[in-house]
Amino acid sequence: MNVGWSFLIFLVLLLIPWVGVGVLGLQGLFVTVIPYVCFLIFIVGLVYRILNWAKSPQPFKIPTTCGQQKSLPWIKHSRLESPFNTFEVVLRMVLEVLFFRSLFRNLRADLQGKKLIYGSAKWLWLGAILFHWSFLIILIRHLRLFTNPVPSVIQFLDYMDSFIHSFGVPPVYITDILIIVGLSFLLLRRLVDAKVSYISHGSDYFPLFLILGIVITGVLMRYNLKIDVYAVKQITLGLATFKPAVPEAKIGTIFYVHLFLVSVLAAYFPFSKLVHMIGVFFSPTRNMPNNNRAEMHVNPWNYPVKHLTYAEWQERFREVMENAGIPIDEEVEKEEHEWYTIYGPNKNLNL
Amino acid sequence: MSLPKPDELISDVKLHSTPAKDWMEIKPELRKGYYLSIVEPKYLEELDLNHMGKWQPYDEKWPLPDGWQEKVKEELQRRMRINRAFKLFMDICVRCGACADKCHFFLGTGDPKNMPVLRAELVRSVIKGEFSTFGKLFGRLAGARKLDEDVIKEWFYYFYQCTECRRCSVFCPYGIDTAEITMMMREILLELGIGTDWGIKPVHNSYYIGNHVGVPPQSFKENLEFLVWEFEEITGIKIDLDKYINRKGAEIMFVPLSGDYFAEPGIYTMLGYLVLFHYLDLDVTMSPFATEGGNFGFFNSLEMAKRLHSKIYDEAKRLKVKWIMGGECGHMWRVWHQYHNTFFGPIDFLEVPKSPITGTVFEHAKSNKIIHIVEFTADLIAHGKLKLDPSRNDHLVVTFHDSCNTSRGMGIFEEPRFILKHVCNNFVEMPENTIREKTFCCGSGSGLNAGENMEIRMRGGFPRANAVEYVHKEYGVNHVVCICAIDRAALPTLFQYWVPGVEVGGLHELVANALVFEGERSRDVDLRRRPLKTPVKGVD
């Protein structure tokens, strides 16, 4: 159900530029207005999300400690799993963000009769790594369309990515293959694994279809349906320099489809689960040091609570304590006696 | 307890098949043995909390107060406003499913709503359905639904099928911590007036009496008297109890757990603490008013947690001690380590903990001035300050159960193992994927250790018991050591059910067993009066 609907939505999106350019001839709309609007939504949306998270305070220091704390000097402290200072936190985050370290730990649990067995489960990690890294490299690679002259770094990356020249002309990008493998795995996993399929919403399939659509149109453009690269570069450079222009040459509808899907992805990004890309940096269980007892953390909305005082309590139990020979504290008696008086939860606190 | 036999209990668990219906279409069916009773209104009243009158979860219609929907929405939004973790965890889950088979309740029930991702989705869906434009436009396709009475029932049912053990958060690529979500949801339920009997009564007891089981000060002393009397009977060594209770001006305040002086097997751990203090002639005292480290407030709301734990520091101030030491407990240490400095600090009326025996300064506790007794003892052993004879624990084949909160909320792994290796000769680790940060919960933590929900407890504890069963059969393990009072209360029941023949105890019980006192007399039993393998030869 969820798969079907999200695929349908994807197909509709696919048809929009096809009809818009192929039938109605609205090239201008698709190469200028839509990309700009979508890119603007992307930027504004992302800034909004970041500010929105940053606005909420993190009241408590709650790192997940997956390794030995720093305590006694002769005990080896796990600097990555239980970071004690900012440097160690940065290391933990870098490994998390670049190499998906927590996911690498993944396990598989299974019931064999009455026995629970556990095995390593790194496929998800591998699929995710393939997809994300390829996506990043492809993104950077695309900068050659937006720059003139193309910086040597990007040229080098482009060269490295396609160093297998023998496959044909133009050379095949390794990342093109890897991203398709990664995405297909992630999609198949959602469809095949009963558990994952059960928890998947349409909004989990849709981005996969969308990105797969972008990748496939991109690949088709490069290897099969030849397009006018010179005209494309005119458009992209125009977009990048804020002098958008509609080229006179015929590029081929597929390019407009590709660009439209990218625009949709950009606009969809800040409002979907895809913001995990930014969110991961804010995750308090990973980005906080485990120096809880050494450094005080301040909760900006901390407020005083009153509990029963010792004096009140001692009054209640004085007799039995005396009988049991438990010392009575006479000094506290002078305190004001307020039996059963407490602040209610968050009373008069407008949080 | 009308439980099916162990073999039958998990025969219905299927980890790889899911219901034909979408989870949103499956209405909550509250199974007996899976949920907790609701507390009597008077306890909520006396704590100045809301209540919904007299009712129980099995009632067809719950007496939800007028305007409850608005209230819940408001509370959800407020929590997103004041707690980044909650907001973020609601936003960034990609439903990759890495957490799915990590939850002990999922492994023991096969119920997909016990997968951490789906447990959180129970809330996420409402947030999407009520507050997000996308959610309102696309409904179920975007994973959104409306808030109705069934949702509240479901929240109650499933958020009390979470023991806040954080195992899922270890594996989540974004560190989403279901324990935080569970805490928020229980808070919101409590705002409506839904409080469990086993969650609120202990809070009430801790609040007005001093500990969660409601042991009054005189009984606290009597229980300890019994323990030291037992010790004297067995070893001939007399412990002067008076100096440990409510004495002002001691160097250290010790905070025990009621579970440790209330019932077996915890009492032997309590005795272990006292024996160690006596051995070292440590200048330590306990407040009869703060006789509870285990914080039941934490299982209900942060406000409650703060109310209960604050008095420990107030007592330290009153008793004019220099620093605080805490016993072997789980949630107590999560609260103390991760929350309490923020609640109460800066703690400037105490000194940085320094061991009077070894001179070690516990720098890592320099701000909130509390240390774990395990850290203290490990330091003693490392400095050779304890004369230990590990062969006195030779009748035991020991394994160590890492308690969830001290593991994933504190990072204490090596200290207890270091101590264990010095106090016993037969120490076996459980399988790698079930220990340390991957440790499994006892299934009864966070206020679930009641009688009416026995089935879910046995199911939830199944992964832990299964790992113990493995080392029991393979290596003859007959004793599980843990550093959590709830473990000591819950694991014996669990093992009785799944792995008969395995006993449970705290770390300091074994320390006390192994301690060699000068001039001690001969004996042939341990502190539990179990026969020793090699009797102790003393100077009789």
Image: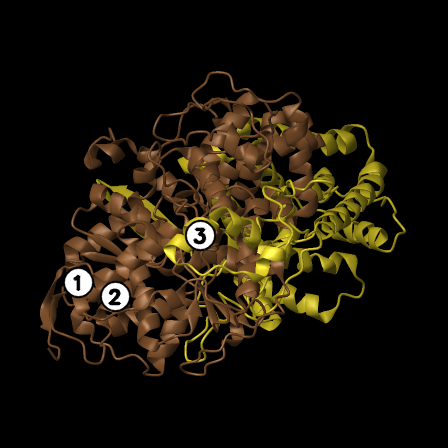
Q: Secondary structure at mark 1?
A: loop
The Cα atoms of the two marked residues, 2 and 1, are separated by: 10 Å
The reply to whether the C-beta atoms of the residues labelled 2 and 1 are less than 8 Å apart is yes
Q: Chain B colour?
A: brown
Res A292 visible: no
Horizontal and vertical percent position of residue A12 = 67, 28
Q: Which residue is mark 1?
A: B396
Quadrant of the image containing the C terminus of chain B: bottom left
Other-residue count near label 2 (Cα within 10 Å), few / some / many at <14 / 14–19 / ≥20? many
Horizontal and vertical percent position of residue B273 = 34, 65
Horizontal and vertical percent position of residue A255 = 72, 43
Amino acid type shown at disc 2: Leu
Of the numbered discs 2 and 1, the one sitting upstream in the chain is 1
Examine the rendered structure and indicate whether residue B183 appears above or below residue B514: above
Quadrant of the image containing the N terminus of chain B: top left
* Chain identifier matching the yellow colour in the rendered picture: A
Q: Secondary structure at mark 3?
A: loop
Q: Answer with left or right where residue B50 lies relative to residue B235.
A: right
**Residue A157 placement: quadrant:** bottom right
Horizontal and vertical percent position of residue A258 = 69, 42
Task: Please determine if labels 1 and 3 lie on a single subunit.
Answer: yes
How many discs mark residues in the rendered view?
3
Q: Which residue is mark 2?
A: B510
Of the numbered discs 1 and 3, the one sitting upstream in the chain is 3
Q: Answer with left or right where residue A193 lies relative to residue B88.
A: left
Which mark is drawn over residue B294?
A: 3
Task: Identify the chain of the residue marked 2, using the numbered disc in the image.
Answer: B
Q: Answer with left or right where residue B330 lies relative to residue A261.
A: left
